[in-house]
Amino acid sequence: MEKITSMEDFKLFRERLISSIDRSTPTLVITAGTCGQASGANDLIRIAKREIISRGLTEKIKLRITGCFGFCEAEPSILLEPYGTFYPNVGVGAVPGIIDAVSKKDVIEELLYKDPITGDPIEKQNDIPFFGKQLRTLLSRNQKVDPIRIFNYIENGGYSAFAAVLAKHQPRWVIEEVKASGLRGRGGAGFPTGLKWELLSNQKNGAGKYLVCNADEGDPGAYMDRSVLEGNPHCIIEGMLIGGFATGATEGVIYVRNEYPLAIKHLVIALRQMHEIGLLGQDILGSGFSFDINIVRGAGAFVCGEETALIHSIEGRMGEPRQRPPFPISHGIYGKPTAINNVETWANVPIIFEIGAKKFAKIGTPNNSGTKIFSLVGKIKNTGLVEVPMGITIDEIVNDIGGGPSGKFKIKAVQTGGPSGGCIPVEKFDLAIDYDHLSQVGSIMGSGGMIVMDENTCMVDVAKYFMGFLKEESCGKCYPCRKGTQRMYEILDDICKGVGTLEQLDLLEELAKVVQDSTMCGLGQTAPNPVLSTLRYFKNEYHEHIEHQRCPAGVCKDLITFAINDNCTGCMFCSRNCPADAISGGKKEQHVIDQEKCTCCGSCLSVCKFDAVHVE
């Protein structure tokens, strides 16, 4: 691989790459992130390669393997560039027909996305409501690059922002631009990125400085960072290079959990290519600036998302937080000044210098600029990753982009911010999503998880689930978190079993506030959010469990029974699927559930096609 040693060499190299590309050539773009591969993308790739080669179309049709587009509900999918034709949920048998249509400049209408209201086929990707209603500044780049080909990134403008920053020779100007952009850390706390860089820049440089990319994404249902790492690792590396130049840091660390093998693979390849081409290491582009990046694999501890616990883990010690001050910005990795930002924050940095700080600041709302990626999961039609400007309402995300509820039951609430976030009721869906408004309703932005819940969701059970997760993930270093989360879980468990008392309900709220005020790190301080938010908005459900031993949503097993009504046709589907053999009845006869055998697993309710099973 050709090594680039100067600014002029880089400019000529990029111009040569761009001039060699014919963007008019039809290109099949197949998403092969983790979600795509799990849905069968590798089979599509194999068949597409075979068909293109066997038909002698290698000069007429190109194939690009990319990361996730975000529309997980549509995986595996094929996008045809430059036309923008999008085929969702493509089966292996459809690939030869698609290649036929491409060679004839035709479109297969029956394979296109269907409008959810009219049923009409929609050809263009950006005309599909899921895509068209977003502002995809980061995710749209995933579909333009093959993550394991650095040339692909450079020919699409990659590393041009870094080269321009280097050529300007003004680290202080870089920091001022980031401050002017209004970019806030996307990892949860929302600390101003430019201010953090300024604090690091002001530290003495004698002992060396570190920059860290926190890719320890541990929230259930959240996978934004993973998808960016898998689909476009070079945008994170470019952001860290710009940050290194601005702050005087010479060492970078990408801390990624070992549960992300594809992301790690693509990062390893990207870093190797960077060294080979001369964009990492000593005297980059002949500028005198030196910077290198290493990967540290985490073991998946949720608490390592906290800065000081992450630093301990990087140093090879147990991942548990420490008291602050001193803060990592002055005493971080091995006692050296350290600045930590998450994946999405670093990925936004090159965009600031591509479009300009003023233009970036105009996206979103004052004090909350730019876009934010959310993982939209749960009882929603269009699951996936959505990238929207700050300040958009929850209703727009859930109903306009997400398509509303996945079933016949109405949406009840949405939980934002991961396990430490809060549950926001449907009455508050006109709320603008940004750091300030979410905190006002008892939730947090977090890393960007968004779980949609419908009327079949028990909010007490939700609080219990998240408290169980946090109880297990607590490092145990401080007593309020270690025992407080455990005791809150025990009280919630009692309430779900119908043996809770009103005195326990008062104790639960008091305990949640004590834990919030007295724990050492962010995990403990935000752990009570699921409890406090559900008590704030869904207290009636707690009273139903305690005073009437009834679960309104029909979820808590100790408070419900399943019964079969007169709608039963005797199809025997429920009895065949009952793991406890608790359902009896002959063919075309009304079935009966033996309550002594029934484990309330709900399989009968989920498989019945005639609304013959109900919860009492």
Image (cartoon, helix red, strand yellow):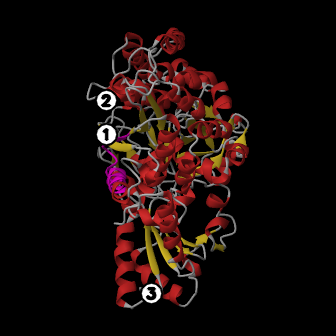
Q: CA distance from mark 3 to mark 2?
A: 49 Å
The answer to whether residue 383 shows anywhere in this view is no
Label 1, residues with CA under 10 Å away: few <14, some 14-19, many ≥20: some
- The secondary element bearing badge 3 is classed as loop
Q: Which residue is mark 2?
A: 313
The mark nearer the N terminus, 3 or 2, is: 3
Question: Magenta segment, which residues?
Answer: 252-272
The mark nearer the N terminus, 3 or 1, is: 3
Of 410 and 88, the residue lying toward us: 88
Does residue 108 appear left or right of residue 315 in this picture? right
Determine whether label 2 and label 1 are within 8 Å by CB.
yes
Q: Tell me, for residue 59, which label it has, or none.
A: 3
Residue type highlighted by circle 3: Glu
What residue appears at the point 47 percent right and 22 percent down from the top-left corner?
A: 522
The mark nearer the N terminus, 2 or 1, is: 1
- Count every numbered label the image shows and give the total: 3
Residue type highlighted by circle 1: Val
- The secondary element bearing badge 2 is classed as helix
Determine whether label 3 and label 1 are within 8 Å by CB.
no
Residue type highlighted by circle 2: Ser
**Residue 494 magenta-highlighted:** no
Q: Tell me, for residue 296, which label it has, or none.
A: 1
